[in-house]
Amino acid sequence: MLSDGCADPFGPKALRAAMGSTFRVPLPDFEVAAGSVALVAEGGQPLGEVELERYSTFVLGSEREGLPGDLLARCDLQATIPTSRVESLNVAMAGTIALYARRAQSARRS
């Protein structure tokens, strides 16, 4: 889902990448669900230390601006992916790593 201000789905690059499907996909209002973890670039609890099974949703912001303050405030926790070996992560990769970490934690407990 896209929240207000996270990206411009009607910007030239987004429209070109979507190949016309932009006008066929509904954009519902974004609501932060209970049990949400905000992924932030800095200052959050290290992702590896979070009991991810307790949370239902990851909330990610735009690559440049991150999440707006009002959305951050509605999340239950802020987590950061340590990037000591890389300069930065794009938002898609950060989401992928978070989902993988959640699955790995679940597998270890099973």
Image (tube, helix red, strand yellow):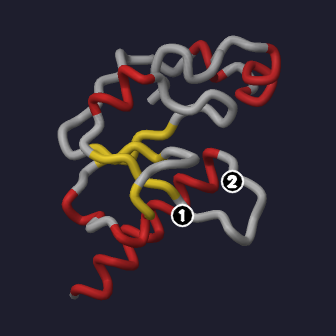
Q: Is residue 47 left or right of residue 85?
A: left
Question: Depth check: 90 or 86 in front?
Answer: 86
Give percent across and percent down for residue 42. 55, 48
Q: Which residue is rendered at x = 44% and y = 63% of the image?
A: 46
Does residue 92 sit above or below 49 in this rendering?
above
Within 10 angstroms of label 1, few (less than 14), some, or many (20 or more) residues? some
The image quadrant of residue 83 is bottom right
Residue 28, compared with residue 109, is above or below; it is: above
Residue 104 in percent (x, y) is at: 39, 78
Residue type at mark 1: give it: Ile
Q: Where's the C terminus, which quadrant?
A: bottom left
Left or right of 81, for residue 54? left
The image's mark for residue 89 is 2
Instruction: Give amino acid for label 2.
Output: Leu
Helix, strand or loop at mark 1? helix
- Which quadrant of the structure image shows residue 45? bottom left
Image location of residue 49, percent across then percent down? 36, 70
Q: What residue would you read off at disc 1?
A: 97
First reached walking from the N terminus: tag 1 or tag 2: 2
Q: Hey, which residue is sitting farthest front in the picture?
A: 43
Residue count near mark 2 (Cα–Cα under 10 Å), binned few <14, some 14–19, many ≥20: some
Q: How many marks?
A: 2
The alpha-carbon separation of the residues under discs 1 and 2 comes to: 10 Å
